[in-house]
Image (cartoon, helix red, strand yellow):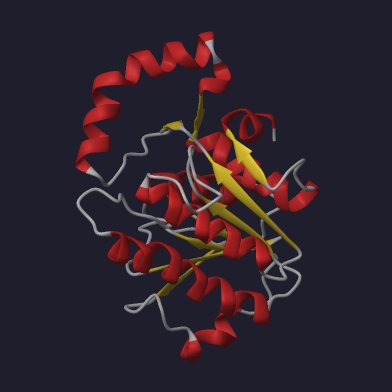
Amino acid sequence: MKVILFGATGMVGQGVLRECLLEPRVTEVLAVGRSPSGRNDPKLKELVLPDMFQYREVTPQLKGYDACFFCLGISSAGMSETDYRHVTYDLTLAAANELVKLNPKMTFVYVSGQGTDSSEKGRVMWARVKGATENALLALPFKAAYMFRPGIIRPLHGIRSKTALYRTFYTLFRPFLGLMAWLSPDSLTSTEQMGKAMINAVQDGAPQRHLENRDINRL
């Protein structure tokens, strides 16, 4: 399969990129972002876009792909709902609307989060915005679309978050995360499991459209 990956420099995206490059079923990865991924591999292509809302000039480079793994996202901390919606909903749909026209047989996998609000009416701002984004993606005529809703994600293989607060959390609680993974495997997932689950969702399908830790780990 040929994969487009958004967010290859983030914690989840790094893990997904690693698994794609290791997986024989993945023959090509196009990493799309504002900056290069920093990886070198014969299967990897890079598309650096200063403006992630505009794709008109690069549409030929986005054709012929089987899957999109959308791992791009930011924390809502300190943001207004209008601003967060712009960089979450608007940015994601700008890419998805273009890709579905170019690749109607594509499977789209979106990384959302545990607690996402599908009703779009709850009190938690980020959950409403993520819910609206999920709903809009599921309404597009992709071959299939899956919403990954992980809770705690354990970074493996030297992968680190770009967010200082998250790096501190993982540094302090790393031993406990390993214990949690042993005692209660479905209380968290990992960057490795996320990547493998996405590949399997494209190849074999998934049991439902919304997948949380337990579903991701099973997949």
Where residue 25 appears, as percent x and y from the top left, is 72, 52
Q: Quadrant of the C terminus?
A: top right
Name the residue at 57% across, 35% down: 193
Residue extending furthest toward the right: 204
Residue in front for this viewpoint, 158 or 105: 105
Name the residue at 33% across, 20% down: 174
| Vertical order, 197 against 39 (above or below) | above
- Which image quadrant for residue 197? top right
Where residue 139 appears, as percent x and y from the top left, is 67, 66
Quick check: can you spot residue 42?
Answer: yes
Residue in front for this viewpoint, 140 or 36: 140
Where residue 26 appears, as percent x and y from the top left, is 67, 55
| Vertical order, 66 against 11 (above or below) | below
Name the residue at 37% across, 44% down: 124
| Vertical order, 201 against 99 (above or below) | above
Quick check: can you spot residue 36?
Answer: no
- Tally of marks: 0
Where residue 83 appears, as percent x and y from the top left, is 28, 65
Q: Quadrant of the N terminus?
A: bottom right
Q: Is residue 193 left or right of residue 92?
A: right
- Which image quadrant for residue 208? top right
